[in-house]
Amino acid sequence: MSDRLAVRKTYKLYVNGTFPRSESGRTYEVTDTRGTFLANAALASRKDARDAVVAARAAFGKWSRATAYNRGQVLYRVAEVMEGRHAQFCEEVAAGEGLSGGRARAVVDAAIDRWVWYAGWTDKLAAVLGSANPVAGPYFDFSLPEPTGVVAVLAPQRSSLLGLVSVLAPVLAGGNTAVVVTSRDRPLPAVTLGEVLATSDVPGGVVNLLTGDAAEIGPWLAEHDDVDAVDLTGAPAGRALELERLAAGSIKRVVRPPAEEPDWSADPGTSRLTPFLETKTVWHPKGV
């Protein structure tokens, strides 16, 4: 028997490369599937969401202008640091999702592999999604994919790591910046991912992680004029249409939530890369 006092953790948000408390001072208890206390997490507010959008907008210029190769290297470094936290991720996924140790390891392996997979797409997007267009005249005509901007992501509520990676990594691979509302009941893998991002090469503000309630924060992000797109994958039940209507006020791109949570272990293809890319067509005279 140990006579040590338990160290009860209170985790913070991850905004602009730092770990602030919620400006509201609110926290909530995180428990495992049996109701055992795990930690306290910050309960993000509207003001926290606004701060995260400001940070994401400020970081967008540098991240979007980085070479595709450089973005790929930065994202690959995240996977390297995730590998170093493998055991911690396994414990948190097992506790939060009620999985056996072996199943949790398989989920964490898949999440890291998924991050590497998207890192590899950064310098291939232009070749696969771009084109040299035939024109009738002395011109070159090219169509190239470009990032949309700041993307708000309501992360999956059940799949706390693999689902989170599957919606976040493609946003970053395309050169966008992200404000993510994590799983409310299973936020600890996202908190650890924030610590990974802070100790990797990802510039501050490129990823901002808000723990808390998507039902509270989602509407503010959906209607925010400086958010360019919103992924509603983890939208609260029955609230997706409301969020779409709010997003329509500023003509955002919207990824609608699936009818039921997808099998995140399946091959994602490019379906999550393309919604947050825009095509720019450039004409250039030749023979002049």
Image (spheres, rainbow, N blue to C red):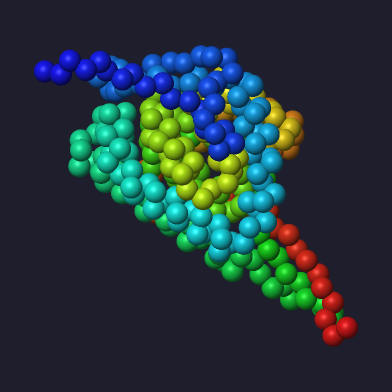
Q: Say which of 37 and 10 sits in front.
A: 10
Classify 236 as above or below 252. above
The total of numbered circles placed on residues is 0
Q: Residue furthest right?
A: 288
Where's the N terminus, which quadrant?
top left
Q: Say which of 202 and 99 sits in front.
A: 202
**Residue 129 visible at all:** no
Where's the C terminus, which quadrant?
bottom right
Q: Residue furthest left?
A: 1
Q: Where is residue 183 in the image (x, y as percent from the top left)?
A: 44, 29
Relative placement, left or right, of 106 versus 244 is left
Relative placement, left or right, of 267 versus 229 is left
Classify 7 as above or below 164. above
Q: Say which of 219 and 36 sits in front.
A: 36
Q: Which residue lies furthest to the bottom in this view?
A: 287
Q: Position of residue 129 (x, y in %)?
A: 60, 63
Q: Where is residue 22 in the image (x, y as percent from the top left)?
A: 55, 20
Q: Where is residue 261 in the image (x, y as percent from the top left)?
A: 41, 36
- The residue sitting at 84% across, 77% down in the picture is 285
- The residue sitting at 47% across, 48% down in the picture is 200
In which image quadrant can residue 216 be found? top right
**Residue 130 visible at all:** yes
